[in-house]
Image (cartoon, coloured by chain):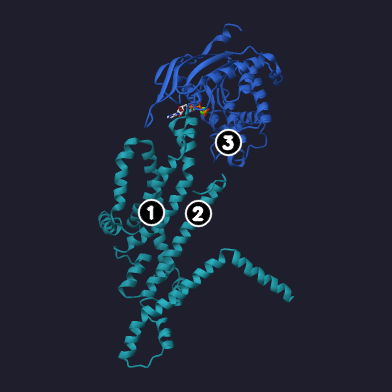
Amino acid sequence: MSDVELKPVIEIEKLNLVFQTADTPVHALSDIDLTVNAGDFVSFIGPSGCGKTTLMRVIADLEKPTGGHISVNGMTPEEARQKRAYGYVFQAPALYPWRTVEKNIMLPLEIMGLSREEQKARAARNLAMVNLEGFEKKFPWQLSGGMQQRVSIARALSVEPDLLLMDEPFGALDEITRDHLNEQLLKLWDTTKKTVIFVTHSIPEAVFLSSKIVVMSPRPGKVIDIIESNLPRDRTLDIRETPEFLEISHRVREGLRSGHSYDD
Amino acid sequence: MTEHAETSKLGLWRRLYDGKSFPVFVVVLSLLILWYAGAVYMNSDRLIDQYERGKVEWSWQQLIEDAWSMERPILPAPQQIVVELRKTVLEKKITSKRSLVYHSYVTISSTLVGFALGALLGILLAVGIVHLETLDRSLMPWIIASQTVPILAIAPMIIVVLGHIGLTGLVPKAIISMYLCFFPITIGMVKGLRSPDVLQLDLMKTYSASAAQVFWKLRMPASIPFLFASLKVAIAISLVGAIVAELPTGAVEGLGARLLAGSYYGQTIQIWSALVAASVLGMLLVWAVTITEKLVLGRTGREAV
Ligand SMILES: Nc1ncnc2c1ncn2[C@@H]1O[C@H](COP(=O)(O)OP(=O)(O)OP(=O)(O)O)[C@@H](O)[C@H]1O
Ligand SMILES: [Mg+2]
């Protein structure tokens, strides 16, 4: 890798976040240290409630940390958000029910003030990307949960951000669609040199997609292992049978096991 | 031939039985029976009095017939109201002071003006309350207080004050309508504008959308079903407001004026026909709002709240 590619996009040092709830404070993030470089594909993996979504929301400036330092593109997360530095795919589709599929995808583009033709072109292109051509005029309630999630992915992609934040985007999909979208995403990442941060519960998915895997553990949410993957960027699904792949999977599994507590 | 008639007759019964018509028919029938019985019961005292003073022989049949056809009954029979309605709705020219259509028109004008003003005021207040914390805290108590004042007490004062500055006729009535009907619209609209969930709002935040964009692209469309739910309540209240406003003004026009005149002269049949006219108007108005709602929401396939 050249020096240019090692430009840090996200730098996190000693980041802490405590939620003040009615009864006890929840220490959602504890002393997180993490650097994401331009062009990285970083996966967060860890048991439910370990703070993956919270960390992603801090990066997106949807949650304020209570301690530590974080910068996005060399700015504060707030400045980065105001510059529309990222596209965010939420854990739930969050479509607007009064808008058609096409109009939902056009929403961010309307806000950005793009021309009508450009909006339509991008909507069509990204709908095709998630295999939903022909569903432009449907309303969200006419789609299955997985289809809705794919629309929300198309919506985030249509912004064409350099940084993509994806919170369990493929959680609601069947295995085959998931494989297909994994390949599509990987191709997109390889050709556009985007930086992707990706949350998943699936070890094979994390290993297949990522150049860097962040293993987290709960209570308090912290990073217990960061695994750099040396798999080639232009990988295909067959790579899942190789010894290198299995070796990385094993290390992720070990990390998850060590961080897992069974006391509650 | 007969067989065909038989099946279609059976089909009719089935349709009646399965559909809404049958239960509605039964309810209407029971109400009518109760009403006719009530008319006999309520009016019989005065009739028997009359018979005894006039020393006339009377039979039950005579009593019932008379009870259903008195000129100023305590409770008129339904057919008397129908006759009165036919006389005042169909047989009078609609510009005549005796035409119920004319009086309905007068009342409905101030209802609609009051409703439009109330909707405007209600929506503006809601927008302010949702966007400005201070308005929420400073205005809300006043808005609620305004609704605890009995309208019958405040209506004459509004009319006197407005009359003093030269506003008479439709305007004061419309203002009283507005005063009554903005409240459910404010409440419904505040709820509607606040209905988007955290995720829908976060999405706007990730696009770094302006407050105006959040309003027009998220809060406003999300509030539409709530708006229509409160408009349905408001338009009925608006009609009540217009009628109530006609009572203390000594108005000579409008359904309220008909009610008042009827009660001065003991014209119960006139009162009842005005009431029937008012409830028909009320139903038509709510129906019009419902149709508009269907047209607006139907396009997006959304259901009413
Ligand atoms: N707004 C909030 N207020 C209080 N506590 C919160 C809030 N959001 C999250 N938490 C707590 O912070 C912790 C981390 O939550 P988070 O949503 O980040 O988990 P996660 O790793 O994304 O889990 P999952 O895999 O189930 O999505 C949890 O214990 C949760 O209860
Ligand atoms: Mg989560």
Q: Mark 2 points at which residue?
A: B290
Residue B291: image location, x then y, percent: 52, 54
Residue A16: image location, x then y, percent: 42, 19
Amino acid type, mark 2: Thr
Q: Residues within 10 Å of mark 1 (few under 14, many from 20)?
A: many
Q: Mark 3 lies on which chain?
A: A
Amino acid type, mark 1: Gly
Q: Do labels 1 and 3 share a chain?
A: no
- Above or below, B200 against B279 in this view is above
Q: In this view, does A151 lie to the left or right of A31?
A: right
Residue A157: image location, x then y, percent: 59, 26
Q: Is mark 2 on a helix, strand or loop?
A: helix
Q: How far apart are labels 2 and 1 at the CA level?
A: 19 Å
Residue B21, numbered circle = none
Q: Is residue B35 left or right of residue B171?
A: right
Label 1 CB-ligand 1 distance < 8 A: no
Q: Is mark 3 on a helix, strand or loop?
A: helix
Snapshot quadrant of residue A254: top right
For marks 1 and 3, give the one nearer the viewer. 3
Q: Is residue B189 left or right of residue A44?
A: left
Amino acid type, mark 3: Lys
Q: Mark 1 points at which residue?
A: B114
Residue ID at (47%, 74%): B32
Chain A drawing hue = blue
Q: Mark 1 lies on which chain?
A: B
Q: Name the residue under label 3.
A: A103
Residue ID at (40%, 66%): B103
Q: How far apart are labels 2 and 3 at the CA level?
A: 26 Å
- Above or below, B297 against A90 in this view is below
* Chain letter, colour cyan in render: B
Please tell me which residue lies in front, B45 or B82.
B45
Q: Is residue B33 left or right of residue A173?
A: left
